[in-house]
């Protein structure tokens, strides 16, 4: 531990003397916290200490205490630790501020106030008795922060827009140590900038999210074989580009591989219709695909809590996990060729220990993109006039650190070939979704020059000395 880090920790102990700092000497608790990330790439990092604030005032005290050490001491901000980008939510030899103890939920004036340490599962459980829902993560284990400040899709995206576009207020600690509210009436520029700006502008301690009336929905999973996948892509493109596209739908189509399936890939549709309608016509092309594994079909009317619990799936710690992504227009040939490329590159890593991976398509329909301006704007740079967009996610889990290099190589080669194919066909969309990005992908620059300038202007206003650029180095930075 460097002398400056030791001094910063001492300053924190004096400022917040309540045992909130966990160091490696407290091995059992430290290891439990540091090994609880989704991805082992984050747990590979060992901070000098982990700070567990229990109030917004303690977060503000942290910022004021650490400010004199900017340039010498680095810190990271952790919400749920579900984003696998290395260094995004943890830091080597610095201080990780872990927000898990900021808890609390309150329904007020048509919104739900969500403390930054909550997870979406708790939000859904809290709202269910009221007959309400929000645009939130599709998994109960997902934290609020990453999805609410970097875009994010929900079951209700087609109807309600991005998760970040439904945040009506951010309670945020800025570099001065002040606690501000950012909304349509106060600090408007900061409100818009936080809708995509990630950890560049402050530490958000509470999200106020718009609610809407919602009962049970229809959804689940359908498993089938790869020869049917091109037809499913065609059906997806047809639905998304139809003038009568149904705004109650949400689609995720995947080619998946896991060693427990044997040597062949399988295909999976994760489908949702946000009304309690059994087998709605808009989903029929995807639910009736043949041949399918009937015994694995989980389509049913269920609550939001049940749907998100099913989605939680393989979220576990101490495994190797990475995402990469590219966005393309809703073009059948580009998406089909992308799946073929992924399958070809997969052959080189099929024997990696514990390998589970997928080529997953998630839709950004026009109805979703149109909600951005209606809800006040964001900095993501996606334009509804460009027609539907498909996010192509390459997701990979594996067990052994010794396989890191070749798994990353497989993902990068597949991604590059998919990008080249899309670009050659004029179908590439210059947007990278931050939560699914790897270190070599510059998500912020993909928002476009105008939005980057807007973010930089907000940074200079609310963080004039660049604390969140110099000291909070994880993720993607505005001035690099």
Image (cartoon, helix red, strand yellow):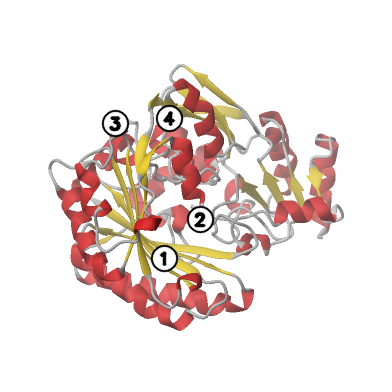
Query: Which numbered disc flags the more N-terminal residue, 3 or 1?
Result: 1
**Depicted 284 relative to depicted 334: above or below:** above
Q: Which of marks 1 and 2 is in front?
A: 1
What's the distance in space between the residues labelled 2 and 4, CA to CA?
Answer: 31 Å
Q: What element carries label 1?
A: strand
Residue 393 — which label? none
Q: Earlier in the sequence, mark 2 or mark 4?
A: 4
Q: Which of 318 and 285 is in front in this view?
A: 285
335 is higher (above) or lower (below) than 144: below
Q: Mark 4 points at which residue?
A: 133
The quarter of the rendered structure image containing the N terminus is bottom right
N-terminal of the pair, mark 1 or mark 2, is: 1
Question: Along the horizontal axis of the image, is 330 left or right of 381?
Answer: left
Q: Disc 2 or disc 3, which is closer to the eye? A: 3
**Residue 476 has which mark?**
2
Query: Image point 54% across, 46% down: which residue?
Result: 199
Of the numbered discs 3 and 4, the one sitting upstream in the chain is: 4
Is residue 66 at all visible to an observer of this figure?
yes
* Gap in angstroms between the C-alphas marked 3 and 1: 34 Å
Residue under label 1, please give it: 358
Frontmost of labels 3 and 4 is 4
| Residue 187 seen in the figure | no
Q: Earlier in the sequence, mark 4 or mark 1?
A: 4
Per the image, label 4 sits on a secondary structure element best described as: strand
- The residues bearing labels 3 and 4 have C-alpha atoms spaced at a distance of 19 Å
How many angstroms separate mark 4 from mark 1 (CA)?
A: 29 Å
């Amino acid at each position: 531990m460097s002398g400056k880090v030791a001094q910063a920790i001492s300053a924190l102990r004096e400022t917040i003397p309540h045992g909130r700092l966990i160091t490696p000497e407290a091995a059992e608790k430290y290891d439990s916290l540091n090994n609880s990330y989704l991805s082992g790439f984050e747990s590979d990092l060992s901070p000098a200490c982990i700070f567990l604030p229990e109030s917004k005032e303690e977060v503000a005290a942290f910022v004021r205490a650490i400010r004199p050490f900017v340039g010498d001491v680095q810190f990271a901000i952790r919400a749920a630790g579900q984003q696998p980008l290395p260094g995004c939510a943890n830091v080597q030899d610095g201080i990780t501020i872990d927000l898990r103890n900021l808890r609390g939920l309150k329904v007020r004036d048509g919104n739900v106030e969500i403390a930054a340490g909550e997870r979406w599962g708790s939000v859904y459980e809290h709202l269910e008795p009221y007959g309400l829902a929000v645009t939130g993560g599709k998994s109960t284990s997902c934290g609020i922060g990453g999805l609410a400040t970097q875009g994010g899709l929900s079951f209700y995206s087609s109807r309600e827009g991005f998760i970040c576009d439904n945040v009506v207020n951010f309670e945020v600690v800025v570099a001065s140590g002040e606690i501000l509210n950012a909304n349509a009436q106060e600090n408007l520029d900061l409100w818009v900038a936080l809708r995509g700006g990630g950890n560049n502008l402050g530490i958000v301690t509470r999200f106020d999210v718009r609610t809407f009336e919602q009962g049970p929905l229809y959804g689940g999973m359908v498993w089938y074989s790869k020869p049917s996948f091109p037809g499913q892509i065609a059906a997806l493109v047809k639905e998304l580009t139809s003038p009568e596209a149904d705004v109650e739908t949400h689609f995720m189509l995947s080619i998946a591989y896991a060693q427990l399936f044997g040597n062949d890939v399988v295909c999976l549709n994760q489908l949702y219709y946000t009304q309690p309608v059994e087998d709605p016509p808009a989903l029929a092309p995807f639910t009736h695909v043949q041949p399918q594994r009937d015994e694995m079909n989980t389509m049913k009317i269920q609550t939001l809590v049940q749907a998100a619990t099913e989605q939680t799936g393989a979220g576990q710690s101490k495994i190797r996990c990475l995402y990469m992504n590219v966005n393309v227009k809703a073009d059948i040939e580009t998406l089909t060729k992308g799946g073929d490329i992924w399958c070809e590159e997969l052959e080189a890593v099929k024997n990696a220990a514990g390998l589970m991976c997928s080529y997953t398509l998630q839709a950004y329909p026009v109805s979703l993109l149109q909600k951005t301006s209606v809800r006040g704007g964001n900095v993501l740079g996606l334009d509804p006039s460009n027609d539907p967009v498909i996010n192509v996610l390459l997701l990979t889990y594996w067990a052994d650190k010794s396989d890191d290099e070749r798994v990353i190589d497989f993902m990068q080669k597949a991604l590059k070939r998919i990008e080249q194919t899309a670009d050659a066909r004029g179908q590439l969309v210059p947007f990278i979704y931050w939560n699914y990005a790897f270190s070599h992908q510059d998500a912020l620059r993909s928002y476009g020059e105008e939005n980057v300038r807007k973010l930089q202007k907000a940074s200079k206003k609310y963080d004039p000395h660049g604390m969140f650029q110099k000291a909070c180095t994880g993720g993607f930075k505005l001035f690099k």
